[in-house]
Amino acid sequence: MAQGNGEESRGKGRLTSSSTPKTSTPSFHQEAHGVRLGVSMGRRLFLGRRRLFVAIELVLLVLLLIGSNQSKVVAAIKSPRPTAFVKMAQKSSEKDDASSSVLRELKDTIRHQAAEIEKLKKELATSAKKPKAASSGAHSHHGGGSADNEDILDYKEKSSISIASERVTWLAVFLLSLSFTAIIMNGFEHTLSKQIQLAYFVPLMAGHGGNTGGQAVGTVLSALSAGVVTRKDAMKVIWKEALSGTMMGVVLGAVVGPISHYLMGISIPVATVVSVTFPLLSTIAALLGSSLPFVCVVMGLDPAVIAAPAMTSFVDVTGLLCYFLIANQVFRLFGLEL
């Protein structure tokens, strides 16, 4: 009986010990469920705040798209904090203020320059109406030019009759000087009758002298009108032009003489005369063409009207005279009768 009671008590003990974990299992699940609920609520709260920040960023992004360019917006999107948008908005407003001030200054500068241009136009119109004496006095101070400022400005309004009346007198004077060519031809008629081939090159000599002198006159007149040279540079310019004329004459004489002999059948004495005359004629033409503009400026004359025809007349006379004088000397060297 006692043994049975012991077994019964042990059985109850087992039942008691085995039932204990069964009663603790529901409280453990409840705690785990509570933890999961807490984590879920925290995650939802974090996601809610993050969505709030994203919404704020999107609102600022829309505002910045109105007053800023795309590059600034992209830079703001890459920023992890909303404060980047605030800083960028401040910088954008500062730059807008600076650009507006620059535009205002630019407009003021344009207005100022326009006023100065109008003032200069009025001054130019006033100076164009000044008397001719004042204009010529200014030119004499600066060393002269191709023509007076008034003459250049009034050329468009001049009639053909006034232009012809100003030039015909000088052309008549130079026409009288060209009559000396007829005197020279008459004086060397005997030489021409013995060597008729000399007459072939008379137009050639006259044309070459006019071309060489015309180049010198045009160059010097352009330099004087531009103010590159003045009367103080006269000797330097004349020497330079004369030396260049000599070199050109040597080159052309060495070409024309052989061509006239081998291709045209001209005799050797006449071809020699042509070759020797070219350097001297080119030197005289360049010398006169470069010196006559300075002479006109010193005398108070218009070199554009006087220098070129004066050079042509003097070169024709002196060149023809040199041509026949050289021919006489060359023919004597060759033993030809004149």
Image (cartoon, grey):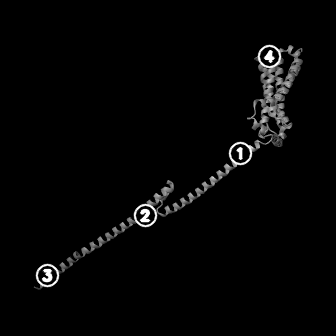
Q: Is residue 318 above or below residue 296?
A: above
Q: Of all residues shown, which one is farthest toward the bottom?
A: 2
Task: Let me know if residue 280 appears in the view.
Answer: no
Marked residue nearer the N-terminal end (2 or 1): 2
Residue at position x 54%, y 60% in the image: 93
Count residues near mark 2 (Cα–Cα under 10 Å), then give few for <14, some for 14-19, many for 20+.
some
Looking at the image, do the residues carrying marks 4 and 1 touch, with CB atoms under 8 Å apart? no
Measure how far apart labels 4 and 3 are at the Cα level.
167 Å
* Callout in the foreground (3, 1): 1
- Nearest the viewer among 289 and 102 is 102
Residue at position x 11%, y 83% in the image: 4
Looking at the image, do the residues carrying marks 4 and 2 touch, with CB atoms under 8 Å apart? no
Count residues near mark 4 (Cα–Cα under 10 Å), then give few for <14, some for 14-19, many for 20+.
some
Q: Is residue 333 left or right of residue 47?
A: right
Marked residue nearer the N-terminal end (4 or 3): 3
Residue under label 1: 121
Helix, strand or loop at disc 3? Answer: helix
Residue 136, percent from left and from top: 82, 40
Measure how far apart labels 3 and 1 are at the Cα level.
134 Å
Name the disc covering residue 53, or none. Answer: 2
Q: What's under tag 3, amino acid-wise?
A: Glu
Residue 196, percent from left and from top: 83, 14
Measure how far apart labels 2 and 3 are at the Cα level.
70 Å
Helix, strand or loop at disc 4? Answer: loop
Marked residue nearer the N-terminal end (4 or 1): 1
